[in-house]
Amino acid sequence: AQSVTQLDSQVPVFEEAPVELRCNYSSSVSVYLFWYVQYPNQGLQLLLKYLSGSTLVKGINGFEAEFNKSQTSFHLRKPSVHISDTAEYFCAVTFAPSNYQLIWGAGTKLIIKP
Amino acid sequence: ETGVTQSPTHLIKTRGQQVTLRCSSQSGHNTVSWYQQALGQGPQFIFQYYREEENGRGNFPPRFSGLQFPNYSSELNVNALELDDSALYLCASSWGPRGDTQYFGPGTRLTVL
């Protein structure tokens, strides 16, 4: 079965330090890749997406992600985090041929230490 | 442009009851997908509606059913509620069913006692 793995359930990091949140998926078939952020008691907001083209994708709030087909990964990075980045981050993937169903990782809580 | 809205925000029901959750899609979107997010977990796909027809379904029993209306708004109905149905129910809309970006509403928090 197709799956998405977020290796870290929590990532603590100091304010203004860089961060990487990891995401791997199970299949090398054609995929569309997404990162969403969920602030406490809120819905999901799209951070960035990869559909095709350049493997380095830039999103909102200074985040970027790199699609690596050979490693079936789509890791999220930010060079300098802010206290307002405290949230849960979800990686989601749609797999060919259907491409309609988002398969989600379990989420990574980003904890910013002052 | 109006975003995705959901109602109600919160709901408390008892086991065995039935519930209807509502979703208004973003302007211009013709596809609605529903997800269940249990506490501390990622969302799980329930089903998707495209132009008023069910376009795909996840691993949920038939007591989870839905509708999409001509204006592309949607309902999720759950019959014979069980304690494990307690979750945040998320609705997402998109233009087209295949791979396009889904935009999420704030969710309905359902508690089953």
Image (tube, coloured by chain):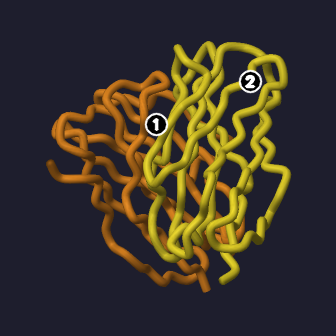
Chain colours: A yellow, B orange
Amino acid found under the numbered disc labelled 1: Gln
Total labels drawn: 2
In the rendered image, residue A102, in percent from the top left (x then y), is placed at: 59, 37
Q: Are marks 1 and 2 in contact (CB under 8 Å)?
A: no
Amino acid found under the numbered disc labelled 2: Asn
Q: Measuring 50% from the left and 37% from the top, which residue is drawn there?
A: A58
Task: Provide the secondary structure element on which disc 1 rests.
Answer: strand
Q: Chain of mark 1?
A: B
Q: Is residue A89 left or right of residue B95?
A: right
Q: Which residue is mark 2?
A: A68
Task: Provide the secondary structure element on which disc 2 rests.
Answer: strand
In the rendered image, residue B29, in percent from the top left (x then y), is placed at: 26, 35
Choose mark 1 or mark 2, whichever is in front.
Answer: 2
Q: Is residue B29 left or right of residue A71?
A: left
Q: Nearer the viewer, residue A52 or A4?
A: A52
Q: Quadrant of the N terminus of chain A?
A: top right
Q: Is residue A48 visible?
A: yes
The answer to which quarter of the image holds residue A24 is top right
Q: Could you say which disc has been placed on residue B48 in the image?
A: 1
Mark 1 and mark 2: span between their CA atoms? 29 Å
Q: Measuring 61% from the left and 22% from the top, which residue is drawn there?
A: A55
Asked if labels 1 and 2 share a chain, the reply is no
Q: Is residue B81 visible?
A: no
Q: Could you say which disc has been placed on residue A55 in the image?
A: none
Q: Measuring 68% from the left and 67% from the top, which residue is drawn there?
A: A110
